[in-house]
Image (cartoon, rainbow, N blue to C red):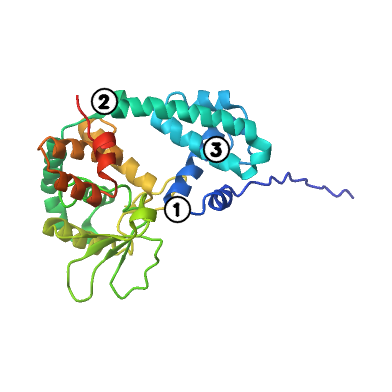
Amino acid sequence: MYIKLKYYIIYIYMDIKKILEEEKPDVSKNTIKAYYTNLNKINKMITNQKEIKNLDFLTDSKKVLEVLSNLTNHTIKNNLVSVVVILGSNKAKYKDIIEEYNQEIKKLQAKIADKYDDNEKSDKQKENWIDYKDVLELLKTYKKDTKPLLEKDKDDLTKKEKDLIQQYLVLYLYSGKAFPIVRNDFADMKIVNDKYDMDNNKNYLVIPTNKKTPYFKLNEYKTSKYKGEFNIPLKDMELRKLIYNWIKITNSPVLLLNLSGNRTTEKNTPMTANGISKYLNKIFKKHFNKTISTSLLRSIMITDKYSNNLSTKEKKQLANDMGHSKGIAENVYNKID
């Protein structure tokens, strides 16, 4: 009688998110997510592994810079900041390599600053730029195309038709028509009433029980550490009606959904910040063959607004409504040809 023994190799993976949270306790959850995503991408490009076992893949700065070389200076810098943060969890061991990365970050910051000083569009921005009026025209097209769909019984809508309605909703939210364009803060957004016990670290669409104006309550966004809770009243009646119709169609407690599942995302789960970026890319790729992110949309809108000779007061208000400073609007988002 033979007993066949099976041997298993057990891999111990690092809890990267926990380490990042311990290293940067004061930054937002979205920033931690961004660090985590950056590190996983670098790890996969270098080791071809989905999970991070250790930080050895970051000790060869030339290799790291090589795999990031096809990205923009701004994106490379953000990735290297993520690298420095995680290596900072063991400063004694990684002191020299951290200094190497910090020097590269300084070089990139200088290059980025040169671009900002001139308010010039990057090559990538030039390639994907559209006029703001084109965004608003596209919104009209979606309104026309979805009108008959919104009149149908929700049970008669196909998955493709639901997706078209959600494209209209996402485009409306990020068109700047109802309110200035914020970042990907509608991700993972729950729909609640004003009696709901809200978490101070989450974002909500609040529909008051007394029929007052609904509003978006943003607790978690890029500059929330400095600006605190940020509310956006839903005054635009057209968008409000669209959202109410969408809630009836989905019967979901969250605003935006992954209508189709894939390898990494289950069907009908809340749309993530990365999911919103991909969704916007899909919309603009289909209609303009352009890759347009939330950040580029913000730049397109601000550039258009600044072309109308805004007063200093109007510039400050616009910046406040978009969750950044007037300086960031003028030096980062406003572009000239």
**Placement of 3 over or under 135, stated as above or below:** below
**Position of residue 65 measured from the top left corner of the image (x, y, whole percent):** 52, 25
The front one of 134 and 98 is: 98
Identify which residue is drawn at 18% across, 51% down: 179
**Position of residue 23 measured from the top left corner of the image (x, y, whole percent):** 56, 49
**Placement of 60 over or under 317, stated as above or below:** above
Q: Are marks 2 and 3 in contact (CB under 8 Å)?
A: no
- Sequence order check: which comes first, mark 1 or mark 2? 1
Separation of residues labelled 2 and 3 (CA atoms) = 29 Å
**Placement of 238 over or under 86, stated as above or below:** below
Q: Quadrant of the C terminus?
A: top left
User: Between tags 1 and 2, which lies in front?
Assistant: 2
Q: Residue 91 occupies which quadrant of the picture?
A: top right
At label 3, the amino acid type is Val
At label 1, the amino acid type is Lys
The front one of 237 and 120 is: 120
Q: Is residue 110 left or right of residue 13?
A: left
User: Between tags 2 and 3, which lies in front?
Assistant: 2
Q: Is residue 162 left or right of residue 203?
A: left
Task: Describe the element under mark 3 as helix, strand or loop.
Answer: helix
**Crowding at label 2, few (<14), some or many (≥20) Cα neighbours within 10 Å?**
few
- Rendered image: mark on residue 118: 2
Residue underneath mark 3: 84
Q: Is residue 60 visible?
A: yes
Identify which residue is drawn at 30% across, 29% down: 116
Q: Are marks 1 and 2 in contact (CB under 8 Å)?
A: no
**Crowding at label 3, few (<14), some or many (≥20) Cα neighbours within 10 Å?**
many
